[in-house]
Amino acid sequence: MDSQLLPALLLLLLLAASGPRGQGTGSREASGNSPEQVPEGIPEEDGILVLNGSTLCLALQAHRALLVEFYAPWCGHCKALAPEYSKAATLLAAETVKAMLAKVDGPAEPELTQEFGVTEYPTLKFFRDGNRTHPEDYTGPREAEGIVKWLRRRLGPSASQLEDEAGTQALIDAHDLVVIGFFRDLQGEDVATFLALAQDALDLTFGFTDQPQLFQKFGITKDTVVLFKKFDEGRADFPVDELGLDQGDLSRFLLTHSMHLVTEFNSHTSPKIFAARILNHLLLFINQTLTSHRELVEGFREAAPPFRGQVLFVVVDVDADNDHVLQYFGMKAQEAPTLRFVNIETTTKYAPAGGAPVTKATVSTFCHSVLNAEIKPYRLSQEVPPDWDQRPVKTLVGKNFEQVVFDETKNVFVKFYAPWCTHCKEMAPAWEALAEKYSDHPDIIIAELDATANELEAFAVHGFPTLKYFPAGPDKKVIEYKSARDLETFSKFLDNGGELPMEDTAEEPQAPFPETVNSTEAPKEEL
Ligand SMILES: *[C@@H]1O[C@H](CO)[C@@H](O)[C@H](O)[C@H]1NC(C)=O
Ligand SMILES: *[C@@H]1O[C@H](CO)[C@@H](O)[C@H](O)[C@H]1NC(C)=O
Ligand SMILES: *[C@@H]1O[C@H](CO)[C@@H](O)[C@H](O)[C@H]1NC(C)=O
Ligand SMILES: *[C@@H]1O[C@H](CO)[C@@H](O)[C@H](O)[C@H]1NC(C)=O
């Protein structure tokens, strides 16, 4: 899997950016908002209004739709957004969509950040009809086309109303994924729910109808949302039950059913793979350059339909840039073709018994046996290095972990780290110093374990660094250390037998996976 395996990163976002075009046509005429009416005195940069406490008010009066970015001069994610934001402003100038983009230097305008509850950068808020008290949080993509699409879905209708067969068929034909709501009563709440969902599901195209001849043509007898797709099963129906349309249920249904039965893993598909929030993934590792490997995908695909919504079927090309996936499973490219199963929430991994060929039957059997808990997960472990106890900081791996930390005569303090984790690197000197300081205490062991390469039966490590203290004694006690990561506080903790006289402020550990392969920055920066 990509480094973005982290469930916490699986935002509730609907489909990621890019895909079929939105139906933002025929905007509900917004007037009095042409660029000519920008009040004099508000400076612009690259087509974006630069606002402060006194000009925000003017901008709200002049623009019925105003998207405001709160940024900080030092914020890297804001810098990355800047070119896309100005490109969006250019695109908007050519649109029927009447919306204006603006920005506010947050640190320079503390009253505004306080008024709008801005706690991280960048934060974007969407103001309509000059309403200053109830802006909508911008949750859309951070690239130009996506920003425009998001605005279009709000300013125009988010779904087209369909009246006849020709128009309906044309809509279905024009896109890979089209969602049509068949509702008997267009005034009902279900339609409002449907249109609200359509505002955010930018990858899908939406239509709706109340026309009886369309119900009949598509064989529909009660209110139903239908996903039409140009692949796999071609169509998936979501009947509305007596309780009414639930936006969360519909959203999950659309995510699940808009995925291909088999998805090829790459940087473009990985956000969707994780956004689908299907926790079980079955991966087929093949070398795409080999015909004999490519031929296995067919049997893999044939096994997939009964597991739709429960297990996501993914093909990983070991010949492409997927080393991080191999590493995650503790595999080598030479092992392909082979299968692995992972639950991305618990990170438990399963491998099939060696030797079996990959066929529809073996894939299906493997999947069932994992789901029925008939096979045991495997855990990664490095080999114990011969010099594991030669340096002041001892090296632990999966294979020697329990033996060392549950030694009844030793107090063991362990740092669980990831090689890419910046907070771990920052605390490394303090950890070394601690180990030096206590090197003549035979009952104290300072150790570290690379938790990306060693998985433990005792517990899963969810953030980096995680620090745990295993005091001597027979009862296998584990104390989580959550205080300041410096020599003084560590020493105080050890001297006090695994307790601090007073709790010092904790630093949050980093997420268990980096945001991208190369970056360990958090998605947003705290104020
Ligand atoms: C806000 O910006 C306007 C236009 O640049 C400027 O004239 C005004 O002095 C600024 N107000 C404050 C309080 O900084
Ligand atoms: C702003 O919007 C909220 C929620 O829709 C509404 O209750 C409020 O009255 C609006 N305020 C103004 C000034 O229009
Ligand atoms: C994939 O197969 C080709 C052809 O046999 C081989 O040259 C290449 O090294 C293989 N890739 C990997 C990562 O093993
Ligand atoms: C990561 O860094 C390598 C080498 O600097 C680069 O080739 C690759 O494209 C980067 N990947 C991402 C996802 O940024």
Image (cartoon, rainbow, N blue to C red):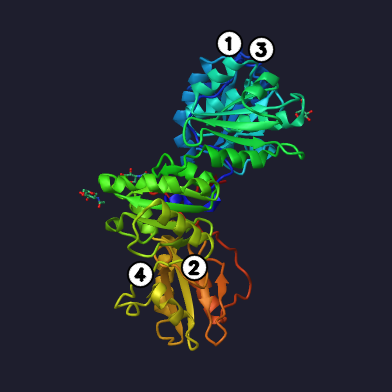
Q: CA distance from mark 3 to mark 4?
A: 66 Å
Q: Residue at label 4?
A: 382
Q: Secondary structure at mark 3?
A: loop
User: At label 2, which amino acid type do we have?
Assistant: Asp
Residue 62 falls in which quadrant of the image?
top right
Calculate the distance from the C-alpha at mark 1 to the C-alpha at mark 4.
Answer: 66 Å
Q: Are marks 1 and 4 in contact (CB under 8 Å)?
A: no
Whether residue 410 sits left or right of residue 527 in the image: it is: left
Q: Earlier in the sequence, mark 1 or mark 4?
A: 1
Name the residue: 62% across, 29% down: 199
Residue 200 percent location from the top left of the image: 60, 33
Please report whichever mark, 3 or 2, sits nearer to the chain's N-terminal start. Answer: 3
Tell me the quadrant of ligand 1: top right
What type is the residue that disc 3 sits on? Ser
In front: 135, or 325? 325
Q: Which mark is residue 374?
A: none
Residue at label 3? 31
Reading the image, the residue beneath label 2 is 486
Whichever of labels 3 and 4 marks the residue nearer the N terminus, that label is: 3
Q: Which callout, 1 or 4, points to the residue nearer the camera?
A: 4
Q: Which residue is mark 1?
A: 36
Residue 139 seen: yes
Mark 3 → mark 1, Cα distance in angstroms:
12 Å
Query: Does dot 4 land on a helix, a strand or a loop?
Result: loop
**In terms of image quadrants, where is residue 195?**
top right
- Residue 398, given in percent of the width and then of the height, sits at 41, 72
Mark 2 and mark 4 lie on one chain; the one further toward the N terminus is: 4
Q: Earlier in the sequence, mark 1 or mark 2?
A: 1
Measure how far apart labels 1 and 2 are at the Cα level. Answer: 58 Å
